[in-house]
């Protein structure tokens, strides 16, 4: 009898190729989905880290981020009183979410005096740095309390998270505040005008449109991220 060589038929080869193709597609889709979720997580961790960076700058009295700034040679004041001319007022993180925010800023604030008695202070910004989220990641919502909403129209389109030197309290200001009006012009204490009230934390939603994280900043200084199921 003639001997036959063992091998694969054409149909078997086609089945194997089809299964390989399906597996490859499934793995690729799974990887792309995983990578996108990691990008969102990285964006949330980035914002959390930069918020803590601003907080540390305020607490440590960082006033030399800009060597030409007005706070380079003066001491850090205790919050409220006493205040001396050219003193560090604090650091803040600013988010403009008028359109989905892909960037945010960290800026220092210095108090300068007009030399009068009693003095009148004005605020000058320095050391401004802009940060960008990973590609495709953005802030979709800013909430301060349970009454806030993001649809159909957001309650807050801009937010300022303000940290003061030697002060464990975090201050939140809304979109109606000028970027140089965080502190009272006569005392240097936090300006009550424009402060967000009625809540204990501000929440930023970080997303790519499919998965989301929240970054929470509490008035006590706690900063953490939470994955939204």
Image (cartoon, grey):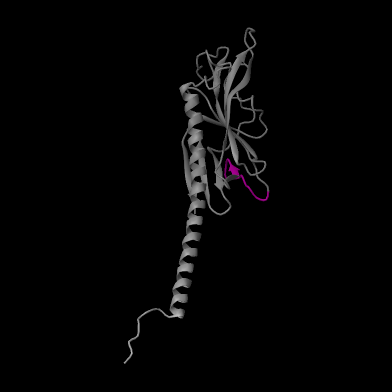
Q: Nearer the viewer, residue 130 or 96?
A: 130
Q: Nearer the viewer, residue 222 or 147?
A: 222
Residue 58: horizontal and vertical position, in percent?
A: 50, 25
In the displayed structure, 81 sits above or below 175; it is above
Q: Which residues are magenta?
A: 141-152
Q: Is residue 187 among what the camera can see? A: no
> Can residue 220 be found in the magenta stretch?
no
> Can residue 149 be found in the magenta stretch?
yes
Q: Nearer the viewer, residue 188 or 122?
A: 122
Q: Is residue 79 left or right of residue 123?
A: left
Q: Nearer the viewer, residue 132 or 96?
A: 132
Residue 132: horizontal and vertical position, in percent?
A: 57, 38
Q: Is residue 116 left or right of residue 1?
A: right
Residue 214: horizontal and vertical position, in percent?
A: 52, 45
Q: Exactly how many numbered labels are in the figure?
A: 0
Residue extending farthest bottom = 1
Instruction: Name the magenta segment's main secondary structure.
Output: loop
Image quarter hosting the N terminus: bottom left
In the displayed structure, 206 sits above or below 82; it is below
Looking at the image, which residue is at 55% across and 18% down? Answer: 67
């Amino acid at each position: 009898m003639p001997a036959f060589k063992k091998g694969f038929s054409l149909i078997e080869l086609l089945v194997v190729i089809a299964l390989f193709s399906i597996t490859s597609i499934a793995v690729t889709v799974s990887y792309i989905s995983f990578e996108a979720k990691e990008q969102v997580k990285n964006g949330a961790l980035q914002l959390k880290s930069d918020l803590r960076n601003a907080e540390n700058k305020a607490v440590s009295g960082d006033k030399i981020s800009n060597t030409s700034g007005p706070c380079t040679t003066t001491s850090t004041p205790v919050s409220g009183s006493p205040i001396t001319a050219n003193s560090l007022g604090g650091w803040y993180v600013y988010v403009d979410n008028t359109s989905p925010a892909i960037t945010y800023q960290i800026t220092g604030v210095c108090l300068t005096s007009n030399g009068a008695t009693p003095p009148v202070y004005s605020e000058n910004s320095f050391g401004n740095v802009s940060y960008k989220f990973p590609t495709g990641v953005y802030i979709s919502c800013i909430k301060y309390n349970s009454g806030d909403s993001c649809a159909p129209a957001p309650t807050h389109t801009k937010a300022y998270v303000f940290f003061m030197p030697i002060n464990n309290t975090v201050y939140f200001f809304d979109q109606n505040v000028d970027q140089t009006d965080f502190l009272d012009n006569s005392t240097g204490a936090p300006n009550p005008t424009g402060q967000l009230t009625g809540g204990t934390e501000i929440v930023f939603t970080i997303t790519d449109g499919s998965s989301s994280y929240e970054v929470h900043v509490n008035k006590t200084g706690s900063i953490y991220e939470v994955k939204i199921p």
